[in-house]
């Protein structure tokens, strides 16, 4: 099928997801070979929240923003 990821590229992207997950232990990070996106599921806060992006740097920024927002919401009276 045209446009499919080859095995090396899939493993390379999966390693990036693993590195993100190690850097952010409050998240479960996956790489979707079909979607070609990184998926982040928080292990805190609302269980139905998640983010997806094809750019791991953008995803990481969104994750950091969500962590800060959650922390600020918990501190509010």
Image (cartoon, rainbow, N blue to C red):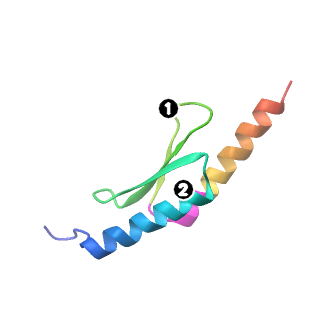
On residue 6, the disc is none
- Ranked by sequence position, the earlier of labels 1 and 2 is 2
Q: Is residue 76 above or below residue 32?
A: above
Chief SS of the magenta region: helix
Q: Nearer the viewer, mark 1 or mark 2?
A: 2
Quarter of the view holding residue 38: bottom left
For label 2, the residue is 21
Left or right for 52, reference 64: left
Residue located 57% across and 39% down the image: 43
Residue located 68% across and 45% down the image: 67
Residue located 55% across and 60% down the image: 20
Tag 2 secondary structure:
helix
Using a 10 Å C-alpha cutoff, classify the residue at mark 1 as few (fewer than 14 neighbours), some (14 to 19) or many (20 or more). few
Residue 3: image location, x then y, percent: 22, 70
What is the quadrant of the N terminus in the image? bottom left
Instruction: Determine if the magenta segment contains residue 25.
Output: no
For label 1, the residue is 48
Distance of label 1 from label 2 (alpha carbons)? 18 Å
Between 30 and 3, the one lying in front of the other is 30
Furthest-bottom residue in this view:
8
Quarter of the view holding residue 69: top right
What is the quadrant of the C terminus in the image? top right
Left or right for 17, reference 57: left
Counting every numbered tag in the picture gives 2
């Amino acid at each position: 099928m045209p446009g499919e990821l080859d095995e090396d590229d899939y493993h390379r992207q999966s390693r990036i997801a693993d590195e993100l997950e190690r850097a952010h232990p409050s998240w479960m990070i996956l790489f979707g070979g079909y979607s070609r996106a990184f998926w982040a599921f928080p292990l805190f806060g609302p269980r139905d929240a998640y983010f997806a992006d094809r750019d791991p740097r953008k995803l990481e920024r969104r994750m950091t923003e969500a962590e800060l927002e959650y922390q600020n919401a918990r501190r509010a009276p």
